[in-house]
Image: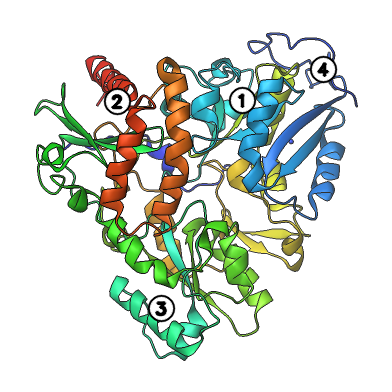
Amino acid sequence: MKTKRIGTALLAVTVLGMAAACSDSPSMDTASSPAGTSEGGKQAALAPITLKGMLFGDQPKDMPVILDEFEKQTKDSLNTKLNIQWNPLSDHKQKVKLMMAAGEDVDFVFDADFANLKELVPQGAYAQLDKYFNNDAYPGLKKAFTPEFVAANKRFDGHLYTIPFTQYFYDLPVVYIRKDLREKYGFQPIANYDDLEKLYQKVQESNKEMTPLAVKGNGGFQEIWTGENNVNMPTIGQAGAAGLPFIVQLSDDGKKVQNMVMVGDAASEWAKLPAPFNSAKTAFPQYDKWAEWSKYLEKDVISQKDQKAYFMSGKAASYYGTISSFAADQKKLKDTIAGADLEFFVLKKDIRDMKPHAISTNYKANNSIAIPATSKNIDRTMKFFDWLFSTQENHDLFEYGIPGKHWEAVGTNQIKLLDESKNYTFPGYEFTWNPSMIRLSQDLTDQTRKYFEYSAMADTYYSAPLAMFTFDSTNVKAEFANISSKTDPFIQMLKAGQIKDWEAQTAKLAGELKALGLDKVRAELQKQIQDYLDKGGK
């Protein structure tokens, strides 16, 4: 199968040399014109403005310090203040949805496909942002977001509705492990799932108060036990609708949908697919493993909102995470628990062995900022983000804090976190991540650095069939919403290993969903996939 490539400049870990009252007037369409300039050619100060935004999580303690510094640096140019509301993760999705429905005054919000993006974009809730990218009037955005990156993150209608944030096209999923406990119990570094399970069994034997593995209640095991990407079949793809995963079989030439099967379908339907997809058990082997390994989780895992905090409190021996947070998490653990240390186990063997073409990707960012269409300050908001990405210094102010206080640069693309960094841990994936502005911690081990470098290589990735396809729920809006209300809690329970007889339970669920319009959603999904293929999609 051909591997879809994207420019290596987009993936390379480099550092380029180098955020008063709201306006009452509607935003003018000035995207083709530069910001106001004085006679000397320097940018003149814009009218004072306060941009309102919504992010999720806890506001970093020193956030006011960073905002003060930003305002001081840009008073004579952007003349902008930021008023950011921080929502608890559990509330953010619903708050954004309600705010959009009410047309409340806000200028930017964090949104993503796993939140409201799939629903709100078709409803026209967010502004189209195409004109702000690849535009000389916004040089920061033009430099930081290549044409390939912009194109990959456009929606089903060919327009861009977000500022997409990513550092790598796959943040390697790992299980973070208390290295000190692993050594205390006499284990060698964890090399496979058998080693990991033996460690968990030892933890349970030695400390009944400690949870072997901490996961988040709404995410569960996620990519633990999801298998290796070693079945790269050019006629088999996956698609999802309303929380339901479908296996899609294409014709040999990849131009026609032949079969489309979902969990809960009869065994006779699965039998139409080639092995190992010819049964639900072999297509989704992780479901049995999740149920089996649920004994290593908290008893009330569904209510867990912050598995990292639970781990950092000393209540768990490991937790599910991604490799991007290793340096910060290792430092936090050492600062929190005397004598503790952190290491990680990479979940998939092909990735663990750093093989080429091991990771399927759609080259889309998982996280983004969206601009409400009702905002009166769209241009000013985009001017702020243009400033943010115009230099490494501007970007680093928000992502890392004040140099000399929170961090200091090491070489050209490394960073040393200072003691006060504990007062400014900013969620860059919500606001600042970009492939061309990555700094790596100087404290990374050689092995960890190699995994970051591996994540940045174009040859690490490939695009599986239908990887670029996005379902549009507009024509089945009511059915989509009704089905999602049933599937979302079910999938949450499944991912947390709480459903043992999942084949019987998914069959029962499928029967219930038929009354809510499942057949209509399935038909619409198949139609859209075929339209996608007819237009040259792969």
Quadrant in the rendering for residue 41: top right
The residue singled out by tag 1 in the image is: 139
Which of disc 2 and disc 3 is earlier in sequence?
Answer: 3
Q: Nearer the viewer, residue 105 or 455?
A: 105
The residue singled out by tag 3 in the image is: 200
Circle 4/circle 2 CB separation < 8 Å = no
Could you tell me the amino acid type at mark 2?
Answer: Arg
The residue singled out by tag 4 in the image is: 40
Q: Which mark is residue 423?
A: none
Mark nearest the camera among 1 and 3 is: 3
Could you tell me the amino acid type at mark 1?
Answer: Pro
Mark nearest the camera among 2 and 1 is: 2
Which of disc 2 and disc 4 is earlier in sequence?
Answer: 4
**How many residues crowd around disc 3 within 10 Å: few (fewer than 14), some, or many (20 or more)?**
many
Q: Nearer the viewer, residue 36 or 55?
A: 55
SS at circle 3: helix
- C-alpha distance separating marks 4 and 3: 67 Å
SS at circle 4: loop
